Image (cartoon, helix red, strand yellow):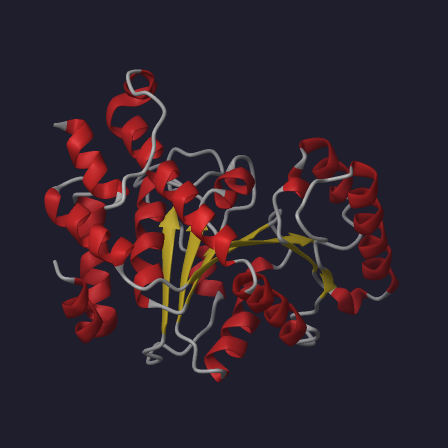
Amino acid sequence: MDINKIKKRGKTGLADALVEIEKNPFDKKSLSLLTQAYKSKNGNILGITGPPGVGKSSLIKNLIKYYRNKKKTIAVIAVDPSSKKTKGALLGDRIRLETDPNDKGLFIRSMAARDKLGGLASITLSSAFLFNALFDLTIIETVGVGQSETDIANIADTVLFCVQPGSGDFLQFMKAGIFEIPDIIAITKSDLGDVAINTHNDVVNSIKIGNYSKEQDIPIILVSSKEEKNIENLAKKIEEQQKNNLNLRNKRKEIRSIFWLEESIKEQFGVAGMRKLKKIRINKYSPFLQFLKIIK
């Protein structure tokens, strides 16, 4: 598989490549393609997380509209709960994301969480590397429960955390330390009025009380997907965070490389396989070539 040939074939070529990676995630062909992607000029990865029902899919739909109007190419990975029978994605998020199927600058893929409790399967990580080489922006929407909040911080250049007005979730977020993870927080459904404003104030106070350590203040933005309100402001904050933190982006690329390597070793050899390895450091070539050396 060749990444330039995939580009020429468009969505069909990309879909075929994903099928091959899903079937044979750790063979030389797949790892060679991922190495090409790793070495290519990369876009940005935006991770969007938050509890179920908070409005992540609706928000993504509006962000897609904004970025496509700016001629930015977009890939979306919608991580869905797994089918107990087939282990595949239930496809709920892709159905909710109504988009133009003929849009060559947009690619949406539903992926199963598989046996990861709210987390991200290794195929999701591999796909993120591939998409990042082919699109200006890759959006990963998590299931929104369990391990996904911490996993997404290991993959994304920017983490957007969504909070629903009036839910009281922010108290649980404080206890779980989730406010340490996001780069930006969106209070969704701001069309609810005072309830949304009160939640915004609660989140601001919670962050102050928690004294969460960030290099800079976390932007907290009220948005409404229903009214398409403040979407542009949110998108500009995302772009600003990605543009002004190049050192952080390089650091996070290394973090997701180590994360992919660790998860892949665990998947192939279990926790015992990880114990046999010393501290993992990514070499200058790619985590995928490094994996091949480890399993020899």
Give how far across and how far down residue 103 sits, in percent. Answer: 35, 80
Which residue is at 50% across, 49% downward?
142
Screen quadrant of the C terminus: top left
- Does residue 194 appear to the left or right of 19 in the view shown? right
Examine the rendered structure and indicate whether residue 112 appears above or below residue 108: above
The image quarter containing residue 123 is: top left
Query: Vertically, is 106 above or below 114?
Result: below
> At 11% across and 44% down in the image, what residue appears?
28
Q: At x 49% / y 45%, what residue is drawn? A: 152
Task: Return the residue nearer the eye: 151 or 98.
Answer: 151
Measuring 18% from the left and 75% from the top, which residue is drawn there?
A: 8
What x and y, as percent, mark residue 66? 54, 78
Identify the image quadrant of residue 133.
Answer: bottom left
**Which part of the image, by quadrant, shows the N terminus?**
bottom left
Q: Is residue 200 above or below residue 278?
A: below
Q: In the figure, is residue 28 to the left or right of 51? A: left
Residue 80 visible in rendering = no
Residue 51 rendering spot, x and y as whole percentages: 62, 47
x and y, in percent, of residue 220 in the image: 73, 58
Q: Which of the pair 145/135 is nearer the observer? A: 135
Please state the total of marks drawn on the protein image: 0
Residue 222 shows in this picture: yes
Q: Nearer the viewer, residue 150 or 172?
A: 150
